[in-house]
Amino acid sequence: MTTSVRFENVSKRYSLGGEPTLVSRMNPRRNRGLSEVWALRDVSFVVEQGETVAIVGSNGSGKTTTLRMVAGISAPTSGRIRVEGSVAPLIGIGVGFNPELSGRENVAVNGQLLGLSQKEIRRNFDAIVEFSEIEAYLDTPVKFYSSGMYLRLGFAVAVHTRPEILVVDEILAVGDAAFQAKCNIRMRELRDAGTTIVLVTHNLNLAVRMSKRTIVLSRGELVFDGDSTEGVGVYHEMLSEIRDVSDTANVTIDGEDVTQSKGQAKVSLDIRNHAGDSKRQVETGRPFSIFVTIEFTEEVEDPCIGIGLTPAEGHDVVASVFTAPGEYRGKHGPGRPLHAEVRMENHLLTRSYIAHAVIYDSQRKWLLGLSPFESFYVKSPSKYFGTTDLHSVLTINGTEMSNVAVVR
């Protein structure tokens, strides 16, 4: 099998503050502010021709640095990289666009940069414009485009060059839902046609659906390379917490804003699997629990607690549990924490989810504390994706089909 991308013991170092100048070398005091960071350390992997590989990891793990080196935008500090085939990079919005040129002119320029001849650009022009859906703005300088319009045009050009290797960073996240779906369909078409795809994404559901193989990076080091379902599980186990919101996040109960926080409680939660182990990966069909600990800085009487689950890629509530005002009776204060557990039957399908907990006063009017948003991953034996296993039964000509689930 032909190899498209090969990394051999690749490391990449960046100097913070720039490379030392002649003046800074002559003046040691000016060197004190210089430091360096290793974006990658001794990373090795191989991507075969026609393979789709997802790269996941937290911010600063080296994902984008890896893609930039695959695309030839950046060179390694040490190690060796071999890339065989034409590369279409989608790493930054508008990369390769001249802001003074119109969209029409940038299609021609960008197409040539990606290896298309003028004849091929003319042949593909209508398809590129139709895919981008920005025909009305085609003769407008792209400096007036929104980030979404940049994305539409850049992606349309890249996928119509029919590259041998498509390199895609998280830029798809800025598009609207309809365009994201359109891009995902196009990437699957390219994948099925034999294009090699290296994909960086925080959408772990997309990583599992698009690729059988996932690479997990952490602080510049490769910590996992293998099956995508296992890789996403490793990534969740690696995370200690996700803090995407603060105590001032908008929270609404029965249509009433309860954003104002008295800050009287520190809320933490722990996710445990069916065996009672603290895990970031649970299994469909096996119950799991969410343990919540609330420590109070002031005296609070009869507080109300809420625990919720949402998909990591979306805002729909999967499940929520709230105590009603007055349902729980108890006084808490410094040294007298509140401990709660929610045990759930797990009918969730393969996906990443977010759990969080909140604590209110006795009338659910004041938000006293909000936990960090904790991510976890559900591993399901079903080959279908969605949110919930509805235990559906499908029969065809009287024969019952197996592994049937509702796909969202």
Image: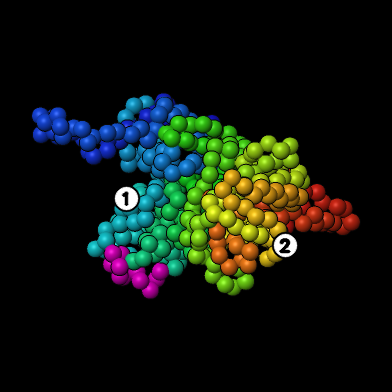
Q: Which residues are magenta?
A: 134-144
Circle 1 crowding by C-alpha within 10 Å: few under 14, some 14–19, many from 20: few
Name the disc covering residue 254, or none: none
Helix, strand or loop at label 2? It is loop
Place of residue 82 in the rendered image (x, y in percent of width and height, measured from the top left) = 40, 31
Residue 327 numbered mark, or none: 2
Query: For the residue carrying disc 2, how many other residues have a C-alpha within 10 Å: few (<14), some (14-19), or many (20+)?
Result: few
Q: Which residue is at 58% across, 38% downward?
A: 237
Front: mark 2 or 1: 2
Relative to 140, residue 14 above or below: above
Quadrant of the image for the N terminus?
A: top right
Q: Is residue 193 left or right of residue 348?
A: left
Q: Amino acid at mark 1?
A: Leu
Which residue occupies 60% across, 62% down? 361
- Quadrant location, the C terminus: bottom right
Visible residue check, residue 210: no
Q: Earlier in the sequence, mark 2 or mark 1?
A: 1
**Image position, residue 215 (x, y; %):** 52, 37
Disc 2 residue type (three-letter)? Glu
Say above or below: 31 vs 282: above
Seen in the image, is 206 located left or right of residue 291?
left
